[in-house]
Image (cartoon, helix red, strand yellow):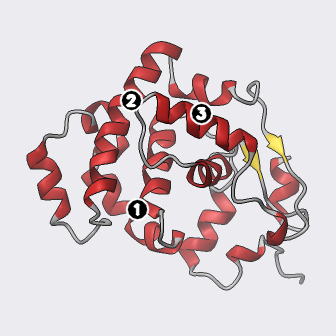
């Protein structure tokens, strides 16, 4: 029996990390709460490893109301102080505060476009951009597309949405398919 071929970044990782690669990463997202979750988690990851964030993901979901942007947008300074005491999340004040700011900006995008999903997919004409990386070395940290989206999000009041963070978000949400061509998910998602 042949072993399953995966993107090399998922090889030798924890069971939850491999499950994330196999079942979520690169799957096109069309649910606004999931979009908000990934924007939050990718921003929280800045300067850290995805494994660190993945271990804390369930706790984030509980503390941030299932990533409901309407609820998070109403978090008070007292709520933020309480969150900063919880070791189940990354206790960086700027990152926690940006989640609330981003929720408020997210709601404005929903109001303007009908959904955040309509907004974010409009950058690619509602199509998945399929790349053909042979290895992890072929994956960029950012692209013109992530530069454009990052700039637009910042203009709308979002924080922790630099081009590298946004490119990781686009990969995670399946707007960009960056599974390597030898990965079993490449064909499934193409």
Q: Earlier in the sequence, mark 3 or mark 2?
A: 3
Q: Is residue 98 above or below residue 182?
A: above
Write down the residue under mark 3: 30
Callout 3: SS: loop
Place residue 122 in its image quadrant: top right
Where does the image place residue 50, in percent across and percent down from the top left? 53, 69
Q: Quadrant of the N terminus?
A: bottom right
Alpha carbon separation for disc pair 1 and 3: 20 Å
Q: Name the residue located 8 percent from the left edge and 48 percent from the top edge.
A: 78
Q: Name the residue located 12 percent from the left edge and 57 percent from the top edge.
A: 82
Q: Is residue 136 above or below residue 173?
A: below
Please give left or right for residue 40 compared with residue 170 in the image: left
Toward the viewer: 65 or 154? Answer: 154
Where does the image place residue 148, in percent across and percent down from the top left? 66, 35
Q: Residue 105 has which mark?
A: 2
Q: Earlier in the sequence, mark 1 or mark 2?
A: 1
Please give left or right for residue 149 compared with residue 47 in the image: right
Q: Residue 57 has which mark?
A: 1
Q: Residues within 10 Å of mark 3 (few under 14, many from 20)?
A: some
Where does the image place residue 110, in percent across and percent down from the top left? 45, 21
Q: Residues within 10 Å of mark 2 (few under 14, many from 20)?
A: many
Q: Earlier in the sequence, mark 1 or mark 3?
A: 3
Alpha carbon separation for disc pair 3 and 2: 18 Å
Please give left or right for residue 56 compared with residue 13 in the image: left
Q: Residues within 10 Å of mark 1 (few under 14, many from 20)?
A: some
Alpha carbon separation for disc pair 1 and 2: 22 Å
Where does the image place residue 55, in percent across and percent down from the top left? 42, 72
Toward the viewer: 118 or 1? Answer: 118
Q: Name the residue located 70 percent from the left edge and 53 percent from the top edge.
A: 142
């Amino acid at each position: 029996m042949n072993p399953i071929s995966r993107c090399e970044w998922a090889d030798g990782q924890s069971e939850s990390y491999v499950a994330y690669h196999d079942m979520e990463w690169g799957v096109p997202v069309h649910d606004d709460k999931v979009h908000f979750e990934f924007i939050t988690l990718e921003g929280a990851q800045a300067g850290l490893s995805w494994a660190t964030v993945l271990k804390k993901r369930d706790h984030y979901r509980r503390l941030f109301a299932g990533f409901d942007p309407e609820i998070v947008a109403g978090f008070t300074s007292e709520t933020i102080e309480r969150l900063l005491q919880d070791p189940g999340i990354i206790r960086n004040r700027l990152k926690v505060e940006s989640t609330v700011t981003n929720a408020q900006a997210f709601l404005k995008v929903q109001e303007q476009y009908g959904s955040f999903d309509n907004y974010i997919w409009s950058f690619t004409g509602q199509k998945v951009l399929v790349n053909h990386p042979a290895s992890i070395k072929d994956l960029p940290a950012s692209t013109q597309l992530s530069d454009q989206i990052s700039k637009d999000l910042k203009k709308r009041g979002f924080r922790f949405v630099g081009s590298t963070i946004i490119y990781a978000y686009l990969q995670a949400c399946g707007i960009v398919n960056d599974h390597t061509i030898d990965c079993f998910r490449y064909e499934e998602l193409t």
